[in-house]
């Protein structure tokens, strides 16, 4: 990767969302990137910058939705796809083919869980307000909390094994972008469902140790304490509605 490589990230400027998984990779690697939509509109930023990319020439390889990474003329969309491109360039994955495919497998599984989290508050349609689907959201979130979240977390915990005897990382023996993404997933679940996630804590000691280790990495710690880290809020994927945190 050339020191002159220009990375441009296009994502909604007021939420973490799926773009945060990409931001964490850049921040941990200490690589400069331009979060384009967070620039003033007068300087080519704002949501208009994203819409301009989405409405490009019909003959172009247009993305469907953000996050979008622009590197020169190259446009890459989908979080897992972007991370698969970035990881070897940022030193966030090993060199073996087996490790790279397994990392992508885990990242796609994380994406599946993130999609199910989104559907806890928008189970009918993304175009409807949460207030217009609250009854369905309560039913969907109950299913997610009692069945799906434990299933996802137990799978990832099983990969790590016992925290004192098992692995410290999800892919091989070295830190990877999947560890960063797991940090974001766990943090989001803890924000959205503090009571329900808290009940899972005793069954996922390995994942919690991994989460804390990621948070203490120097560049990540600096990022989390900086204004660049957008707080979780009720416009993003991970939303805290107390009535959906069953048992609260």
Image (tube, helix red, strand yellow):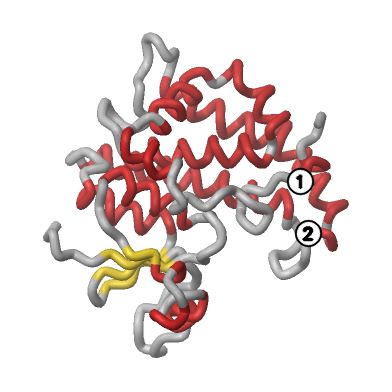
Q: Position of residue 243 (x, y in %)?
A: 83, 42
The answer to whether mark 2 and mark 1 are in CB contact below 8 A is yes
Rendered view: 174 above or below 59: above
Q: Quadrant of residue 190?
A: top right
Between 200 and 29, the one nearer to me in the picture:
29
Q: Position of residue 88 (x, y in %)?
A: 22, 48
Task: Count the numbered circles shown.
Answer: 2
Q: Is residue 31 left or right of residue 118?
A: left
Identify the residue at horizontal 49%, vertical 43% (top origin).
109
Identify the residue at horizontal 44%, vertical 42% (top origin).
224
Between 221 and 92, the one nearer to me in the picture:
221
Q: Which residue is mark 1?
A: 241
Q: Which residue is mark 2?
A: 130
Say the numbered circle drawn on residue 55: none
Q: Quadrant of residue 196?
A: top right
Identify the residue at horizontal 40%, vertical 80% (top origin).
44
Measured Cα–Cα span from mark 2 to mark 1: 10 Å
Q: Is residue 198 left or right of residue 111?
A: right
Crowd around label 1: few <14 · some 14–19 · many ≥20 (10 Å) = some
Quadrant in which the C terminus is drawn: top right
Label 2 vs 1, first from the N-terminus: 2
Quadrant in which the N terminus is drawn: bottom left
């Amino acid at each position: 990767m050339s020191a002159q490589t220009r990375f441009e990230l296009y994502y909604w400027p007021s939420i973490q969302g799926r773009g945060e998984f990409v931001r964490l990779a850049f921040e941990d690697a200490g690589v400069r990137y331009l979060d384009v939509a967070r620039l003033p509109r007068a300087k080519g930023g704002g949501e208009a910058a994203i819409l301009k990319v989405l409405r490009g020439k019909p003959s172009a390889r247009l993305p469907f939705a953000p996050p979008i990474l622009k590197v020169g003329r190259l446009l890459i969309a989908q979080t897992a796809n972007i991370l698969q491109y970035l990881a070897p360039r940022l030193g966030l994955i090993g060199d073996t083919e087996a490790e790279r495919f397994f990392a992508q497998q885990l990242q796609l599984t994380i994406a599946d869980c993130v999609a199910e989290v989104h559907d806890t508050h928008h189970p009918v349609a993304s175009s409807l307000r949460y207030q217009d689907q609250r009854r369905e959201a309560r039913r969907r979130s109950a299913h997610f909390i009692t069945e799906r979240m434990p299933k996802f977390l137990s799978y990832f915990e099983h990969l790590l094994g016992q925290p004192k005897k098992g692995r410290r990382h999800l892919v091989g023996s070295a830190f990877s972008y999947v560890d960063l993404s797991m940090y974001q997933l766990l943090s989001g679940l803890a924000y959205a469902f503090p009571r329900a996630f808290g009940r899972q804590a005793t069954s996922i000691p390995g994942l919690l140790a991994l989460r804390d280790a990621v948070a203490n990495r120097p560049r990540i710690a600096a990022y989390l304490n900086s204004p660049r880290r957008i707080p979780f809020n009720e416009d993003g994927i991970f939303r805290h509605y107390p009535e959906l945190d069953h048992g609260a």
